[in-house]
């Protein structure tokens, strides 16, 4: 009943204003008699918004626990738990802390998690040797989670070299006559090996985020050849070179760096990509300062459709668009062009913006998170990777 009284309050206030103004002019405005001139509306969409129950009945989009994938940063220290300054509420977790978080996620109905490995600088090198280490943090976390939760949980792993290379690029670097470049084809074997290592440790889905050309086909072939034909590929098919990844790079220690990599750059060899195969190296060996040669240009949309079509043709089982809110148009354009599940990554910068705005008291976090996740689903995403997953469900923000 209280809701009815509240709903009527503005009407009562408006009526009081009208009465107050009656001494000067008609409440409908100068020269107008109410109802005598203006047409009555032919359609009344507001009928479907009259009550909360009616709005729920007419709602086209839902965000439920089953639509959310919880990301976790995992480290080798079993008992470690290091808060990440730029991502409030998110931490780098050792296996034991991870298992507690996964258990809570499951209780809340989140049945899938994506794992990102974090290794120390001493384990990084030019060839990302630690990326497919069966004793690395992701492989350990996979085995522990599988043993604790069996098939209740869908375990997804990020497959990319940037967390394991000393230069922070998503592929291997190679010297060419135009300087150091990210060597597409040489990177494929390392990515495929990483996917197989994750499959061996228990991953259900491997999720390449590197944006090398042909990596889905390379991983599919490697997985099949290793007996993992039922391990799927969730491809970051459309990953933009975005400023919104800032906090993630802090969390995973994966920002591209220009210093120090020259010493560990591969010796000049014939490369399968880039320029000047066999040519003379006359540039200094400084790694590219950003990821613009492999991640997508934010100015492009048609190219996104091409990237998605290629990954689907190569055998991807799910396709991702990343980031989410600045690229809802891409999700909406892609939706009618593929039958595969679409995934959006509501990325670290988007999370951090909402957290900062909420902390500053300029918006209501519950409403903003609900609205953002709903918009991502409405645009066409079946699933959303989001750091808000557990908190939003725990605090009832999606109800
Ligand atoms: Zn990467």
Image (cartoon, rainbow, N blue to C red):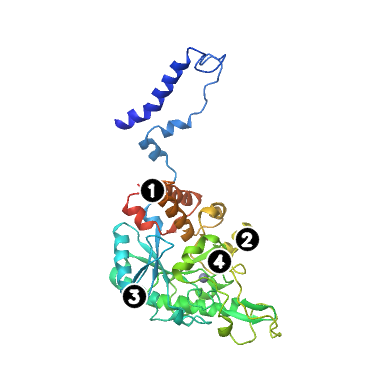
* Left or right relative to 233: residue 2: left
For marks 3 and 2, the one nearer the N-term is 3
> Dot 3 lies on which element?
helix
Few, some or many residues within 10 Å of mark 3 (<14, 14–19, 20+): some
Say which residue label 1 marks.
Answer: 366
Structural distance between the alpha carbons of marks 2 and 1? 35 Å
Q: Specify the label residue 101 is tagged with.
A: none
For marks 4 and 1, the one nearer the N-term is 4
Say which residue label 4 marks.
Answer: 311
Note whether ligand 1 is within 8 Å of mark 4.
Answer: no
Mark nearest the camera among 3 and 1 is 1
> Dot 2 lies on which element?
helix
Structural distance between the alpha carbons of marks 4 and 1? 35 Å
Structural distance between the alpha carbons of marks 4 and 2? 12 Å
Q: Specify the label residue 303 is tagged with.
A: 2
- For the residues bearing labels 3 and 2, Cβ distance under 8 angstroms: no
Say which residue label 3 marks.
Answer: 143
């Amino acid at each position: 009943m209280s809701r009815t009284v509240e709903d009527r309050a503005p009407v009562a206030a408006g009526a009081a204003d009208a009465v107050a103004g009656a001494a000067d002019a008609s409440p409908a405005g100068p020269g107008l008699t109410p109802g005598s001139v203006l047409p009555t509306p032919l359609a009344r969409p507001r009928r479907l918004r009259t009550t909360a129950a009616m709005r729920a009945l007419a709602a086209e989009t839902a965000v439920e626990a089953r639509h959310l994938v919880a990301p976790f940063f995992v480290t080798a220290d079993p008992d470690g738990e290091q808060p990440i300054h730029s991502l409030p509420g998110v931490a780098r977790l050792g296996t034991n802390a991870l298992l507690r978080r996964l258990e809570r996620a499951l209780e809340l109905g989140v049945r899938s998690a994506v794992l990102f490995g974090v290794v120390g600088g001493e384990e990084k090198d030019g060839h990302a040797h630690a990326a497919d280490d069966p004793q690395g943090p992701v492989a350990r976390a996979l085995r522990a989670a599988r043993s604790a939760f069996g098939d209740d949980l869908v375990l997804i792993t990020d497959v990319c070299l940037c967390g394991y290379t000393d230069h922070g690029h998503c592929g291997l670097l190679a010297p060419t006559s135009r300087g150091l470049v990210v060597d597409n084809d040489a990177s494929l074997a390392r990515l495929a090996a990483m996917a197989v290592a994750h499959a061996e440790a228990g991953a259900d889905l491997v999720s390449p985020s590197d944006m090398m050309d042909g990596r889905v086909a390379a991983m599919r072939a490697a997985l099949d050849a290793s007996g993992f034909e039922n391990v799927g590929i969730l491809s970051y098919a459309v990953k933009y070179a975005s400023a919104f990844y800032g906090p993630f790079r802090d969390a995973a220690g994966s920002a591209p760096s220009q210093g120090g990599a020259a010493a560990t750059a591969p010796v000049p060899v014939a490369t399968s990509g880039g320029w000047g195969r066999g040519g003379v190296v006359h540039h200094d060996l400084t790694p590219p300062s950003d990821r613009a040669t492999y991640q997508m240009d934010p100015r492009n949309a048609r190219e996104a459709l091409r990237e998605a079509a290629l990954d689907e043709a190569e055998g991807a089982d799910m396709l991702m668009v990343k980031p989410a809110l600045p690229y809802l148009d891409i999700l909406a354009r892609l939706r009618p062009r593929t039958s595969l599940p679409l995934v959006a990554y509501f990325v670290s910068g988007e999370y951090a913006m909402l957290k900062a705005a909420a902390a500053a008291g300029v918006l209501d976090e519950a409403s903003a998170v609900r609205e953002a996740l709903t918009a991502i689903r409405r645009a066409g995403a079946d699933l959303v990777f989001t750091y808000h997953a557990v908190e939003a469900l725990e605090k009832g923000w999606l109800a």
